Image (cartoon, coloured by chain):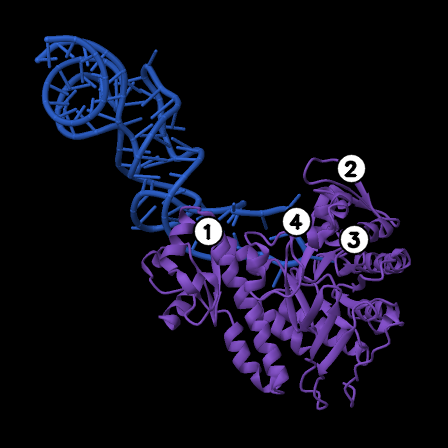
Chain colours: A purple, B blue
Amino acid sequence: MSAAPPEPIERPSDRRTGGRAPFEILVPPPADGSTRARLGRLKLAHGVVETPQFMPVGTNASVKALDPSDIRTVGASIILANTYHLYLRPGHERIARLGGLHQFMAWDGPILTDSGGFQVVSLGDLRVVDDDGVTFRSHLDGSLHRFTPEHAVAVQEALGADIAVAFDQPVPPGSSSRAIVADATARTHRWAERCLAAHGRTDQALFGIVQGGLEPDLRADSTRFIASLPFDGICFGGLAGDETADERNSVLDLAVPLLDGDPRVRYLMGLGTPLDMLEAVHRGVDLFDSVLPARVARNGQLWVPGGRLNLRNQRFLDDPAPIQADCPCLACRHFSRAYIAHLFRARELLAYRLATCHNLTFTLDFMARIRTALRAGVFPQSLPELRLRADRMSASEATVQSA
RNA sequence: GGGUAGGUUGAGCAGGUGGUGAGCUCCGCUGACUGUAGAUCAGCCGUCUUCGACUGUGGGGGUUCGAUUCCCUCCCUGCCCA
């Protein structure tokens, strides 16, 4: 850890300093090295994002089950949308004709578009990767398509999000040989340069993605390489998969210090649970996204301080308490666990909205608590308290605790 | 009262014309989900000492080596006719 915390630098003409996504560090990490966590502020075309921050995922230009008003109310300041999905349907050119992604989905806050690289992995055998790009079949109709770095950038420029992301080749952690990881990482590096060369929109930031899997030297090399390029932000990809928390934290302990003194925002793609994010913030990560809180909410799992509730369990059918007593969300303000448990059984659409509102409120409130602790300068000391709020325990324990 | 079609594991069904009915869909129970092909998926879902065993085709009785199947009788349900 460097002796002196990095000072925020503003040189808009230099992309490396965040010309299109200037990042200001409001509270730098303490000099004693007790944590790398920092409080920051990311300035984007459609607004300011305080960090550490979580981005709800709206793959199809919609945070599933919510409307923009809900998205605001749960506390989101930036959301993620997906290039691959919107390219296939309804088409990036159509969205561009209709005024761009913000106008299309009636969300005037910041948006980040994922590049579609993740789908290279998640679509499994529907694709073939070569050095120039990826040929894949649509999961919708089986039609054949091709993404290159240049095309992925063009699609994202058409969509017009505040932040575009380089087209990469993620490798699932733990399931690939070193040779495959090295190959995918090298290709990601070549594609990163092509994305930068292809990107022209001056009102849109472009973030680069570090790969390298769980191989320490590859991860370090990738961090140095991506950091050497004039991206507006640094993403860590290929994590939040099937690796253990220890493996993930080891990667961060290795990689983030290599960015000391770098004024750009750091984004860990795909995380996650509150506890996972707390550990990553502690290690110097500023930005997160994950489908997890919204997806598990739709499947009946509600997050509460210290644990989680599976509302499909029959004991909740008679539980008159709100999901979480001190929660300001739509679900907790008006409805009982019994009612929402009923809605899930009846497959009523309101169940998905209420559950999603709650889990996103919980997640975003948790990030806000982290920021509050950072602002107050008590972050390393407040870790146990935050951990207690984020820790998982059995649902029955959580029920007893809240009763 | 007469006729007719039925009665299968919580519900709805399949099957079964003397030779091993635990098969399906709901419902229910539990778990999983981390840059969203996911309001999804997986396991369980008669009992038990659970890689196996036992019980179970409305009740009772009969024929038979053996009955869900054939015979007798009773009960219940739908429909039609009185």
Q: Secondary structure at mark 1?
A: helix
Marks 2 and 1, how far apart at CA: 37 Å
Of all chains, the one bearing label 2 is A
Tell me the mark number nearer the camera, choosing from 2 and 4.
4
Of all chains, the one bearing label 1 is A
Where, by quadrant of the figure, is residue A367 drawn? bottom right
Q: What x and y, as percent, mark residue A130?
A: 85, 47
| Amino acid marked by disc 2 | Leu
Asked if badge 3 and badge 2 are on a common chain, one would say: yes
Within 10 Å of the Cα at label 3, are there few (<14), some (14-19), or many (20+) other Cα atoms? many
Q: Earlier in the sequence, mark 3 or mark 4?
A: 4
Q: Which residue is mark 1?
A: A350
Is the residue under label 4 in contact with that under label 2 (CB below 8 Å)?
A: no
Q: Which residue is mark 3?
A: A156
**For residue A144, which numbered disc appears in the image?**
2
Marks 2 and 4, how far apart at CA: 20 Å
| Amino acid marked by disc 3 | Gln
**For residue A60, which numbered disc appears in the image?**
4
Q: What x and y, as percent, mark residue A213?
A: 75, 63
Asked if badge 3 and badge 4 are on a common chain, one would say: yes
Q: Nearer the viewer, residue B19 or A398?
A: A398
Q: Earlier in the sequence, mark 2 or mark 4?
A: 4
Of all chains, the one bearing label 4 is A
Q: Residue at x 42, y 54 (%)?
A: A312
